[in-house]
Amino acid sequence: MALPIITKIDGSITRLLDFPGCDKKTLNIRKTIWLATLFALFDVFGMFILFGIIAPQLFQTVLLQYGYFLILFLTYSLIITPKIRNFYNQYIFFHLTVLIIFTAYIVLRLGGIATSAGLIIASISFVFSAIPLQNSRIIFVLFCFYSLGVLLSGLLTPWLTIPEQLTPRINSIIFMVNTLSMSAFAFYLVHFFIKQQKEIEQLESNKLKEINDAKTKLFTGITHEFRTPLTVIKGMSDLIQQEPDEWLKDGTIKIKNNCDILLTLVNQMLDLAKIEMGVMPVHLVQTDINAYIGYITELFKSAAHHKNIKLKFQNPGQPLIMDVDPDKLLHILSNLISNALKFTQENGEIILSTSIEKNGTLFAIHVKDNGTGIPAVHLPHIFDRFYQADQEAHSVLGTGLGLALVKELTELLGGTISVGSEPGKGSSFVVQLPVTKNAEMKEHLNSGLFKEKDLHSLSSTKTNESIFQVEYKTENNLPLLLIVEDNNDVLLYLYAILKNEYRIEIAENGKAGLEKSLQLIPDIILSDVMMPEMDGITMLGKIKNDFRTSHIPVVMLTAKADIDSRLIGLERGADAYLAKPFNENELHIQLKNLIEQRKKLHERYASLSQFPETHDLAIKTEDAFMIKVRQILENNLSNEDFSIDHLCRELAVSHAQLYRKFKSISNHTIADYFKLLRLHKAKQLLLKPDLNISEIAYEVGFKNLSYFSREFAQQFGKSPTEMRGK
């Protein structure tokens, strides 16, 4: 019960002494000194009670004046110090100086140090009270005042008069009490000071850790964002070097575009740094802001049309003349519109609208979409730089620089930005800017401000373009590779280096990749990690947990190369993990090795004997699938009407899915495997003399005896008759 009361009291004192902008160190100092003052006040009241009991005659001495003075002065200090925010150290210095000087005066009136009733000890405690300030100059000056009082008390003793009421016995008792109470006070201050120092050291340690974590996060974020465009630049450079005639024109365009993306990232970081240092200039002009927003919206109409998205600006129909920084408003809106385009599906809608709020003092810009939305857990952090709560977060939040810059620029203009979102229903960003009319008037802002072709470099997230159409390989002997990647340039590079070795299918995000995986049952999957709608890690988990696709090897490509990201991918079942920019030869080797590893499954399931023991969870999953298929087939060996369609219904898969899955892990078709089971069963039945060969053929599902004999001889090298004779 005591601890909650103490905690409650401490909370009340903290609220009393705290103020906006007060750091923990300053708050600790204020609490220490305030509590010390409270302790001193209680000590004075205790002395009054003690005097009244053991020596009421002392109230006739100067000690009564001293007690009244301390009560009034300390009470005033308890009331005034919580209100003092500026010049706090100077006030405490003045407060303690008055106490030391007045105490020295009372000591002289009592006859000197020997008959001071312990007040000389009280005087030194006032010097100790300045220790929490951690200001050596203040402590030194207070100590000088105290020393001066001691010197005067010692030197002037022969000429001082001792009050007759202060007998030696009373003096020694009060001296003892004062010494004990002041010693307790000094102990409290030293203890609190040591505790405070430890807390400060811990705070500094935590601050250093936060700084180091922030640096790590910054550098990780930078490298993460640079890796995808660097992959394209490096890849296209290699293609130009290998096949200049084919790739010189398109490759150089791709290189230039991705260099622009890198330059945009660098510029955004520099802009953020300028804002932090307070050197980002604001160039306000007075113009029609609604007309300017309408102009910016029009520049994104072609990108919206390309994705079959309706982009509307609900113009209030009347001009609004106010101060605006055209360049910064352009960056704010381009980032918000680009994000909305990126995370709004086909046939979606993005609406920009403006309004005047708070009696004309605020201008609000609303950017609303009906896209994927943002989970509530991520909303408080989406304006943080490089915020990546997890892979899914990235699929919603983009690069992590654009929105951070939007927030900083908005606040630089004196405004605020807020967001509301619901997953699956869309997001709404609201930018509020103060309405002022102090700048120079400028009617037209759209001419020469920027070129439409440069729009992609205004945002850290590009709007998705339609996936290019590839010429599919038709050679059935080539493995089927599904590439899941939302960046068209990376996709183009991957297709260029892999098209001769694989039949290639493509998907633009994890959701489409999962659908195609279930539809096509590819031989291998190459997937990016961070994509809209469904990220690669989520897709990987669904693929590995579905028996129809669990056997498919998956290679993950990611711009996040840290160990934690790799471990997450590998824990979810990734067969390989490559960081962008990757080495082309390494990618070829990884894909080839994983295809070769499938052959180990062929060897495992080629035999009809019991599977060897394994500790590999992935292989155990495939064992379970094969055992289930085999049990169903063995239960229907004699059923001549049993077909693959019956098997598909029992397994709840399509004919194509079952064929691709079974062929991939066993190198057999279902029909061949079923026939093999029947022939091996027939071989076992031939050992029983009570069945003739015709009965055995019918028992294992063969209607035609000659066909049975021919297939049996082809499989075992002997006819059924020869096998039985042997």
Image (tube, rainbow, N blue to C red):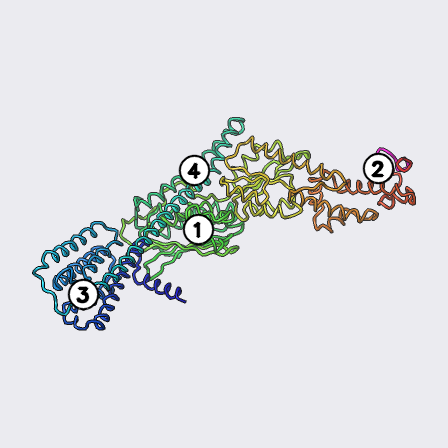
Say what secondary structure mark 4 lies in: helix
Residue beneath label 3, please? Answer: 171
Q: What residue type is labelled 2?
A: Glu
Marks 3 and 4 close (CB-CB < 8 Å): no
Label 1 vs 3, first from the N-terminus: 3
Residue in the foreground of this view, choosing between 295 and 529: 529
Report which quarter residue 528 is drawn in: top right
Q: Quadrant of the N terminus?
A: bottom left
Residue 86, visible in the rendered structure? no
Report which quarter residue 493 is drawn in: top right
Residue in the foreground of this view, choosing between 660 and 438: 660
Residue in the foreground of this view, choosing between 411 and 1: 1
Please report the bounds of the magenta region as a residue range: 710-721
Residue in the foreground of this view, choosing between 340 and 120: 120
Residue beneath label 1, please? Answer: 382
Residue beneath label 2, please? Answer: 711
